[in-house]
Amino acid sequence: MADILEISHLTKRFGGLAAVNDVSFSVPEGGIVGLIGPNGAGKTTIFNLITGVYSLTEGAVKFKGQSVVGLPPYKIADLGITRTFQNIRLFKNLTVFENVLTACHLSATYNIAESIFRLPRFRKEEKALVEKAEKLLEIMGLTDRRDLVANNLPYGMQRRLEIVRALALDPELLLLDEPAAGMNPDETEHLMKLIVRIRDEFKLSVLVIEHHMDLIMGVCEHIVVLNFGLKLAEGGADEVANNPKVIEAYLGTTEEA
Amino acid sequence: MDWTYIQGILMLAGINLIAVLGLSLLTGFTGLFSFGHAGFMAIGAFVGALMTVSPTTTPAGLGLPFFVGVIAGGAAAGIVSYFLGRITLNLKGDYFCIATLGFGEATRLVLNNVQVFGGARGWPGIPYKSTLPAIILVDVLAVVFLANLVKSRHGRNMIAVREEELAAQISGINVFRYKMIALIVSAVYAGVAGVFFAHYMTFLQPKMFSMTKSTELTIIVIFGGLGSISGSVLGALLLTALPEILRAFEIWRLVFYGAAVILIMISRPKGLMGGMELTPAGIRKARMERKARLEALKEMKNGQDGEGSNG
Amino acid sequence: MTQFLQQLINGLSIGSVYALMAVGYSLVYSIMNFSNFAHGGVIMLGAYFGYFALTLLKLPFIAAVLLATVGTTLLAILVERVAYKPLRERNAPFLYFIISAMGASILLENIVIATIGPTFRTYPQVIERIPIKLGPLAIGRLDLLMFFISAICLGGLILFIEKTKMGKAIQAAAYNIKACALMGVNTDKIILIVFGLGGFLAGVAGVFFGMKYTVYPQIGNITTKSFVAAVFGGLGSLPGAVVGSVILGIIETLVAGYISSQYRDLIAFVILIGVLIFRPTGIMGKNTVDKA
């Protein structure tokens, strides 16, 4: 099975500080990979580098075998990589439905003139967009909240909406940045099931940053551990959990404790 | 109060409305603030007048039909806005604001020095072409085009840019391109408004397009409400008619406007219309949103009184 | 050659007025990452405060300047509390701040027109109009005074920011205000001080502008040029604001002198376009990256 995402020797320096330092790993097609590490380890920076929000200092990022380095974020989204954010970045004043409908835009091709004059292609494609948005909401259980302004959604549902919005772009690789942040164990379990379900139903690959260990251990087939911008370890759940370097990074050595 | 007087107010309001609608797209829907849209009006006005003025009154005039002037004026404003956008839209928001400030002032200053247009003293002899039916027609078209644009994926993308630019990028939206589209459309609208203005006043002077005019246009958009087309329509009517009615309080008018703008921003940024549209669909949408919010509140209360989970 | 040097001196003189205006604006920008477009209105009121202190209250010059600057400091803080603080607390988008600033600017300008009236006022003569002669060159006494006071103010500001604890807090806030708050710094107080300082500088700028030229409600429009100067020097950089303003003043005067006074006001915008196309960060500007 080919790797859908290949990161090699990825490095990002801000002035003298290397936020990400020579990191390499891959996400297999259809896999769920976890990216963990203490705060400030460089995880979100890696997401920003993959999605083109930051430009990299050194290294390569290959998506489906093609380099995405230097492409603007919107192009990378078009190619099939979407993400959610650590601090939820929904379109807060728009309704749940509008958030998703907006993100469906890549599924239509009508141009501005066709919009202004309401030409047939506009009508046909717009109808399809609305149907697509409704269907997504239904699959993800948000239909009864469709007219609620996103800002008024309960926190857990806001996170879910952000995932739905990302799915509206028909991604092949989904980057989730701390999707379980602020959730209780119950909600976290729902989320875990959701992630696996999304991967199976939408046929995509997932790379998830998380601090909730039950989610990571329960859902990820492969885990990459970062600290201070360097890759500490990688492997399956058991391997990583028993890796002394990982334990040290999270808990400190016995001398310090 | 005779009909000619009322008609005059309606025509001025109608002309203002064209520019306000364009500005509404730029500021209300896309979230970009312009200090200098009067500059685009000026470009439209002067270029349009150049097309229609008879060569006997002004040597450079071309004496072409009015609609040529309208198209030329709008296009000229659009073209200039493209260049302005290229150098400012990929920079941070403040740069765009300062650039529009500079652009508005610079346009006025340049026009002051162009003797073909009479310089600062003004340019008389422009044919009167802006009849009320013509203005109403353009207004209707302007509203319909704008409404259709907003209710499409392109309009939604612009709104997304306003809401959360980074999330918009990540959602596959070419932010720079949409900002540019909003800018060009708003400039074309302003340019067309300028042409109608020129052919209503039959006289042009660069100082008619000062920073005061730019800010007045923006104030109308704010009063009507960011993100509401019907708000802009009502705002244009009200704020063009109001000064006439309150002529006794003229000097306090702008004081009131300044204070009102601050108040609106800190308490009700969505303005008069609250972001709502005064159409059947708009009212329905507002009702559904309200219902959803009340249901959600009720649920939250039940959750607090009864069980705890929120998920 | 003498004419050139004379023009240089004239340019320096107007440049230092722009510098006083631009630094107050850049100071607020560097902390709040926000263009306080109401700054012009505060400068204008500084000119009026000074004028009335001298004519109505018949205060001696120094007292009048002091009164004017106290007035503008308080005014700047008032504007912040009323027009910006509520928005900050609600995490309002950038657009709302700009609109509120515009509202404040209109309010200030027109309150003056409505109450005091739009007529131009001239400052009573405080400094002798006879210029000091340096060989063939003439330097206005007022210009010299302005230059020194500006230098003192700016020097004092830089010392304050570099050497005092509060100054360091301001520097930290300029870098990342949220992190500052998390570190337990009273960011509200910092913002107050920054706006206050900006207001103080606006007062000095206003009084000097009024003395050099005249006093009228639309003085705020001149600050457009100081915004351009701030961009030219690098938005957010205080030394940049000074450098940009001085260079702008000199270029402007040279253009007016050697080419035509018609183009004098236009040159600022030509410079602006040039900066935006070739070097948006300006001469000494800092680069900021938006974090996801």
Image (cartoon, rainbow, N blue to C red):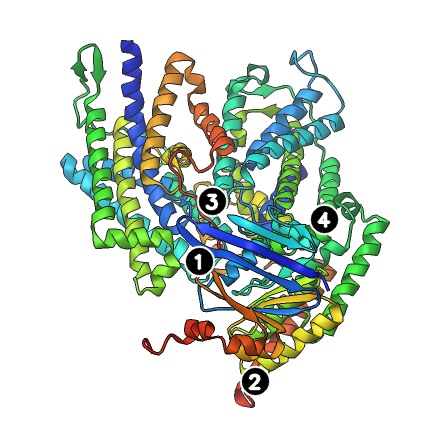
Amino acid type at mark 1: Leu
Tell me: residue C49, above or below residue A93.
above
Determine which residue is flagged by label 3: B253
Q: Is residue C110 something that shows in the picture? A: yes
Mark 1–mark 2 Cα distance, whole angstroms, equals: 33 Å
Q: Are marks 3 and 4 on the same chain?
A: yes
Image disc number at residue A236: none
Amino acid type at mark 2: Ser
**Of the image marks 3 and 4, the number of the one nearer the N terminus:** 4
Chain of the residue displaying label 1? C
Within 10 Å of the Cα at label 3, are there few (<14), some (14-19), or many (20+) other Cα atoms? some
Q: Secondary structure at mark 3?
A: helix
Tell me: residue A256, above or below residue B93.
below
Determine which residue is flagged by label 2: B309
Image disc number at residue C87: 1
Left or right relative to B274: residue C30: left
Q: Secondary structure at mark 2?
A: loop
Residue in the foreground of this view, choosing between A162 and C50: A162
Q: Residue furthest right?
A: A120
Tell me: residue B146, above or below residue C118.
below
Residue at image point 17% right, 14% down: C133
For the C terminus of chain B, the image quarter is bottom right
Q: Residue furthest left?
A: C60
Image disc number at residue B149: 4
Tell me: residue A96, above or below residue A20.
below
Q: Are marks 1 and 4 on the same chain?
A: no
x and y percentages locating residue A189 in the rendered image: 60, 81
Q: Secondary structure at mark 4?
A: helix
Chain of the residue displaying label 4? B
* Marks 1,4: beta carbons within 8 A: no
**Of the image marks 4 and 2, the number of the one nearer the N terminus:** 4
